[in-house]
Amino acid sequence: MQVSVEKTSELSRKMTVSVPETIIQEKMAVRLKSLAREVKIDGFRPGKVPQHVIKKMYGERVRGEIAGDLIQATYYDALKEQDLRPAGHPHIQSEEEFDGFKYTAEFEVYPEISLDGVDQIEVSRPVATVQETDVDGMIEKLRAQKKTWVPVERASKQNDRVTVGFSGVCEGENFTDGKVESYAVEIGAKQMIPGFEENLVGLESGSNKTFEVSFPEEYGNEKLAGKVAQFEVEVVTIEEPILPEIDEAFIKEYGIEGSLEAFRDDIRANLESELGQALQGKLKNAVLNALYEKIQTAVPNTMVDQEVESMMKPYIETAKRQKMKPEDLNLPRDAFEEPAKRRVALGLILSEVIQKNDIKLDDDKVHLTISDMAKSYERPKDVIDWYYSDDTRLNDVRQMVLENQAIEWLVAQGKVSDETISFDEAMSKQG
């Protein structure tokens, strides 16, 4: 076997493998001899068919089978010989030669990643605590979840629920399929496009109003995105919210038997748990951002393609559930490509950090992570058993924990400065 490798781009390789005719003939002789004992041909007794007859009838097929077997047998040996690590499946083409047979395998390889300076990255670590005002705010949110609505005879205002009938026209075309009847809108909830809810303030039951607002540029319907629409609205009813009292009955609905102070303690404990996870997530993002900026690496296109498909999959699945054709989604690949490149690059860099620094998976942390995820369920043990009963699910958690251990290692090595932020800033999804 002869092997040669051509570098066609930074990560692309074209490997050519040649196999001598003598090896092919040796393997064909063995295969044809075996066939001679098995096949039945008119005019010959079983096992007595001459080799030249077998070769004439089956030689081409057998040679093709042997060529396939040789590709399977020699491909990984050739990679090992040339010290190549392919990223993804190869594109293989074979061809016959007068003195044997050869094939070319085109593929991308994993990049060589330099970790110079990785132990000196600078990150800002967010620090926050749960204040009494944060507990107050959560209690108000819980009250809002239990609010009831009472009809009022006055002009509508912020936070009211207004039931309306409305129709919409854009560029002379009605896009609401006539008139939408009895549609409830909570003013200030931002359920409608910007400007719609604001135009419902100050109206009374039975009143009508015509107004114009613009659809956002990123609106899901391309026919309406960024365009001005005219709405005609008729107010049917106006209701104001009534929040429940924070009494024993209210507290009991959240599984707390006891005083308001016990209720507040329970809320504080939950908020502190959520805060800890949020701060850990923000620190991880800060480290990943610093890492991505510090370590430059090329990424295999095949891995980026796979990541793009993975990122698009939830949108396609949602479309299928809504009886839509995936091709009608018009998902722009460009919107996914840069985030996909970033994910692939960071995955490769973290893998290198883990390997070069011999970071071993901590099974205790895996169990603790699964236990924490199970806490919010009614039967935590069942959830824990569910993870440990399936290797795929368990491996996903293991990979996450191992990456978190790599982040911890980077934080321990790097230059970290604490930054105090508020609870709301910590819980924000930005950053």
Image (spheres, rainbow, N blue to C red):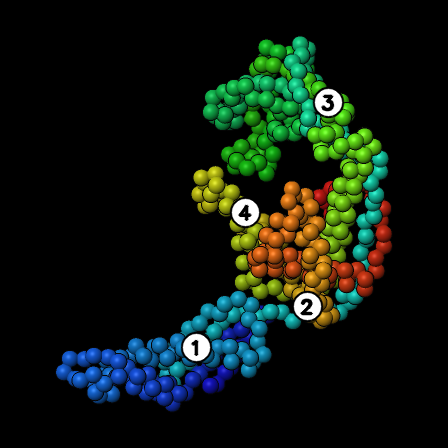
What's the amino acid at mark 3?
Pro
What's the amino acid at mark 4?
Pro
Of callouts 4 and 1, the N-terminal one: 1
Residue 59 visible here: yes
Of callouts 1 and 2, the N-terminal one: 1
Closer to us: 123 or 252: 252
Question: On the image, numbered disc 1 is attached to which residue?
Answer: 71
Question: On the image, numbered disc 3 is attached to which residue?
Answer: 244
Of callouts 4 and 3, the N-terminal one: 3
Q: Are marks 4 and 3 in contact (CB under 8 Å)?
A: no
Position of 350 with respect to 95 (left or right) is right
Please tell me whether residue 234 is drawn above or below residue 329 in the rendered image.
Answer: above
Question: On the image, numbered disc 2 is attached to which residue?
Answer: 352
Residue 6 on image: x %, y %:
53, 77
* Mark 3 burial class by Cα count in 10 Å: few <14, some 14-19, many 20+: some
Please tell me whether residue 36 is drawn above or below residue 200 in the rendered image.
Answer: below
Residue at image x 46%, y 86%?
1
Question: On the image, numbered disc 4 is attached to which residue?
Answer: 314
Residue at image x 59%, y 10%?
206
Report how far apart the C-alphas of labels 2 and 4 lie in the structure.
Answer: 29 Å
